[in-house]
Image: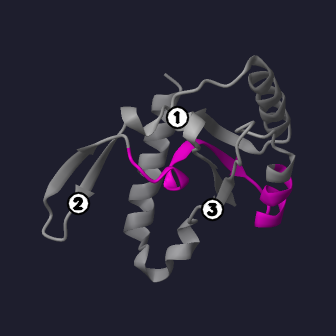
């Protein structure tokens, strides 16, 4: 199963405070463990929401662009990983080993399973499945460039 692991933002991450060399080293070692175990699929830190935008989509279909920063820090994400694990329990075990991503502040990791094709049942028709597989193959081809 794929799990998205969100590193929740804090006041310091939203202020653009960069991680220390020690934290970068500790995270590098943790990421190396994830890679060696075949868990890590992707992972990135994110700029503060002041550099971001949101696109709100109304029920009528209009799009409104809202510039950051966004006020509810506890609802924001400062970084993420995508992990491939056998179970949510395995993901939790790895999350417990993670270095403190926000030293000096209370940090939080949120783990969310990604939908698998089978989760969509009959709504995911053979035609939609073929289209999805074609898109995934194209994404993979483009990443190899």
> Does residue 44 lie above or below 59 as drawn?
above
Q: How is the image coloured?
A: one colour
Q: Which mark is residue 112?
A: 3
Write the residue at 71% across / 48% down.
106
Q: Which mark is residue 46?
A: 1
Give left or right: position of 69 versus 142: left
Q: In the rendered structure, which segment of residues is drawn in magenta? A: 70-94
Write the residue at 69% across / 61% down.
1
Front-lying residue, 117 or 92: 92
Disc 3 versus disc 2: distance between alpha carbons?
23 Å
Q: Earlier in the sequence, mark 1 or mark 3?
A: 1
In magenta stretch: residue 21: no
Contact between labelled residues 2 and 3, with CB atoms less than 8 Å apart? no
Write the residue at 77% across / 31% down.
27
Disc 2 residue crowd, few under 14, some 14–19, many 20+, Cα 10 Å: few
Q: Earlier in the sequence, mark 2 or mark 1?
A: 1
Disc 2 versus disc 1: distance between alpha carbons?
23 Å
Q: Name the residue beneath numbered marker 2.
A: 57
Disc 3 residue crowd, few under 14, some 14–19, many 20+, Cα 10 Å: some
The residue mark sitting in front, 1 or 3, is 1
Q: Earlier in the sequence, mark 3 or mark 2?
A: 2
Q: Position of residue 69 (x, y in %)?
A: 37, 40
Front-lying residue, 54 or 142: 54
């Amino acid at each position: 199963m794929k799990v998205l692991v969100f590193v929740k933002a804090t006041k310091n991450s939203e202020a653009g405070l960069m991680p220390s060399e020690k934290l970068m080293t500790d995270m590098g070692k943790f990421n190396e463990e994830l890679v060696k175990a075949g868990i890590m699929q992707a992972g990135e830190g994110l700029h503060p929401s002041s550099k971001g935008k949101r696109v709100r989509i109304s029920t009528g279909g209009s799009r409104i662009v809202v510039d950051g920063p966004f006020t509810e820090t506890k609802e924001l994400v400062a970084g993420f990983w995508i992990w491939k694990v056998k179970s949510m329990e395995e993901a939790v075990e790895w999350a417990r080993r993670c270095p403190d991503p926000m030293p000096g502040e209370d940090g939080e990791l949120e783990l969310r399973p990604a939908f698998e094709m089978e989760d969509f049942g009959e709504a995911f028709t053979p035609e939609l499945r073929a289209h999805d597989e074609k898109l995934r193959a194209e994404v993979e081809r483009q990443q190899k460039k």
